[in-house]
């Protein structure tokens, strides 16, 4: 059950995402179309909601996330396909285990826009990456509160009225210590992320 702290996080993120200057966004770098150029560094706020499915389905979590999206080959010193991006995100929130517990993570992901499927409104993508997380709880045989956090997902940017795009993604979310502790029972979850660029 989502507690009051989770609800407050969700409300704050939605409030921060709502006010935007759509005219200024539509004219970034001289582009008047709905889709921003790939080379532009963009920032977003999002909410994450997740539900564990292994080893138990009793853990739910909600987080607020800050995201930066970079042109991949401007960050890494090698050539990369034009639709490839590098995403960095930091998230903090609460998990219900069923008691309220802190959950935070920092992740980096490669994001690839699937241009053949893009429309004037939708820009689908796939993403995968890894990060580190801290959870203020343990499941049986987990071993550590500090863990690795690999993720794999699909999503889409959603553009309307020439303003900054919204985005929605579904991910498989894993937490485990990678064998750094003898007890390494991981937690697998399904996650939905909803956010908006600004």
Image (tube, rainbow, N blue to C red):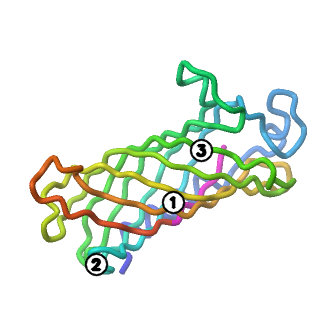
According to the picture, the residue beneath numbered tag 1 turns out to be 47
Q: Are marks 2 and 3 in contact (CB under 8 Å)?
A: no
The image quadrant that residue 112 belongs to is: top right
Q: Is residue 3 visible?
A: no
In this image, 53 relative to 160: left or right? left
| Precedes in sequence: disc 2 or disc 1 | 1
Q: Residue furthest top?
A: 77
Which residue position is annotated with label 3? 111
Out of 153 and 63, give the one closest to the viewer. 153
| Separation of residues labelled 2 and 1 (CA atoms) | 23 Å
Q: Which residue is located at x 85 percent, y 49 percent?
A: 162
The location of residue 134, given as percent across then percent down, is 26, 52
Disc 1 packing (10 Å; few <14; some 14–19; many ≥20): many
Instruction: Tell me if mark 3 has few (under 14), some (14-19) or many (20+) residues whose alpha carbon lies within 10 angstroms of its own.
Output: many
Residue at left offset 12%, top offset 51%: 181
Of badges 2 and 1, the one in the foreground is 2
């Amino acid at each position: 059950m989502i507690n009051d702290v989770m609800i407050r996080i969700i409300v704050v993120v939605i409030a921060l995402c709502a006010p935007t200057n759509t005219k200024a966004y539509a004219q970034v770098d001289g582009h008047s179309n709905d889709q921003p150029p790939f080379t532009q560094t963009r920032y977003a706020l999002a909410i994450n909601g997740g539900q564990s499915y292994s080893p138990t389905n009793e853990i739910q979590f909600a987080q607020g996330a800050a995201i930066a999206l970079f042109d991949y080959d401007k960050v890494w010193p090698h050539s990369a396909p034009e639709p490839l991006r590098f995403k960095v995100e930091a998230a903090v929130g609460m998990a219900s285990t069923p008691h309220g517990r802190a959950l935070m993570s920092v992740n980096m992901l490669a994001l690839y826009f699937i241009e053949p499927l893009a429309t004037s409104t939708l820009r689908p993508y796939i993403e995968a990456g890894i990060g580190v997380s801290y959870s203020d709880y343990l499941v049986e045989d987990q071993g550590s509160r500090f863990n690795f956090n690999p993720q794999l997902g699909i999503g889409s940017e959603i553009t309307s009225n020439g303003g900054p795009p919204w985005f929605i993604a579904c991910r498989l979310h894993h937490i485990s210590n990678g064998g750094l502790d003898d007890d390494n029972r991981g937690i697998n979850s399904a996650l939905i992320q909803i956010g908006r660029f600004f």
